[in-house]
Amino acid sequence: MLKTIILSGSLLFFSSLSFANSISIEIHPNTKVISFDHPIRLETAISESLDAKLPVSPQSYSIANALYNKDKQYLADKKQREVINELKLLYATSPKLRMSAAILIAQIERWQVGYRETVNLDYDAVRTTPALNPMLTGNYLFKFTPRPSHIHIEGLVSNPHTTLAIPNYTVSDYLDEAALTLSSGENSNAWVVYPDGKLSKVGFEYWNNQHALLPPGASIYIGFDSPSEELAKLEQDILTLIAWRISK
């Protein structure tokens, strides 16, 4: 199995071609090719991207590094399609939630998503912990970015948008300044989707304020107020899509 790993800007692409058991790493824009006669581990893929000395590297903002499995892209597309279809059904059958469904559909239809693997992409952790250093097989997209300067505010708010990340600002601070929650949205708790894809539900009202600080690139998502079991599941699927998002 011949693998080609292509680095371009902040993206590292893995593709597979049938040719013995060798591996070829093509680094762009350097037009440099490195070949191996054996499979490579995650550590090697990360180290090769570091050696390429691109303007953006896996160590630029490691909490936002993401590895997407291109062979499972159909699963990400399927989940996004199913979520949108469920919201369209909600729009058609629940008059009280029609505006909420429309706002969510408009947001989710813009997203580019991929199947994000749950792996640790911190180089130091990967190279020192064998359990975090799997063998790579198949086709992948490795995304790494510079430190962002923004926070996403989305979900059941009247003005979903991106705002400037401010040091020591909490979820409560961002929502107080910039977001009007819809009547169907939860008014005391919000979901936070961190750049590494992890989720946390935090209180932001005066009586339950957890004073949760956010790293740049995080998303604040306002979900449904007292959701049914079906809406709670739909909400979890939306949060997964945010974690899997490649771009908005």
Image (cartoon, rainbow, N blue to C red):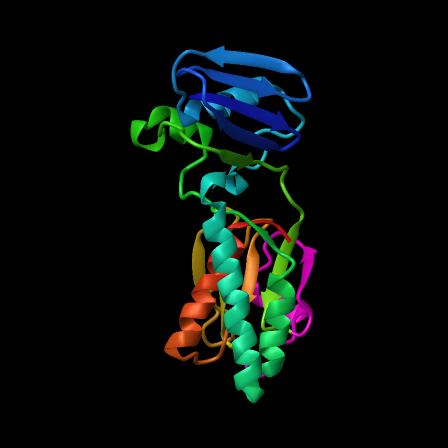
Report whether residue 222 is seen. Answer: no
Q: Which residues are magenta?
A: 158-184
In the foreground, 64 or 135 = 135
Residue drawn where x is 55% and y is 67% of the image = 84
Considering the image in quadrants, where does the N terminus appear? top left
Residue in the picture at 53% in, 85% down: 93
- In the displayed structure, 158 sits above or below 166; it is below
The reply to whether residue 143 is in sight is: yes
Q: Is residue 178 above or below residue 162?
A: below
> Which of the 4 image quarters holds residue 61?
top right
**Membership of 175 in magenta stretch:** yes
- Asked if residue 62 is positioned above or below residue 163 in the image, the reply reads above
Q: Position of residue 222 (x, y in %)?
A: 54, 70
Q: Quadrant of residue 26?
A: top right
| Count of numbered circles on the image | 0
Q: Is residue 16 left or right of residue 144?
A: left
**Location of residue 186 in the rendering, given as x and y in whole percent from the top left corner:** 51, 77
Q: Quadrant of residue 154?
A: bottom right
Judge by depth and name the residue closer to the eye, 154 or 113. Answer: 113
Vertical position of residue 132 compared to residue 160: above or below: above
Q: Given the current orientation, which residue lies at the most extreme front position? A: 18
> Is residue 52 located in the magenta-colored stretch of the structure?
no
Give the x, y percent position of residue 17: 49, 24
Q: Position of residue 79 (x, y in %)?
A: 48, 58
Q: Residue at x 44, y 75 (%)?
A: 231
Q: Nearer the viewer, residue 95 or 155?
A: 95
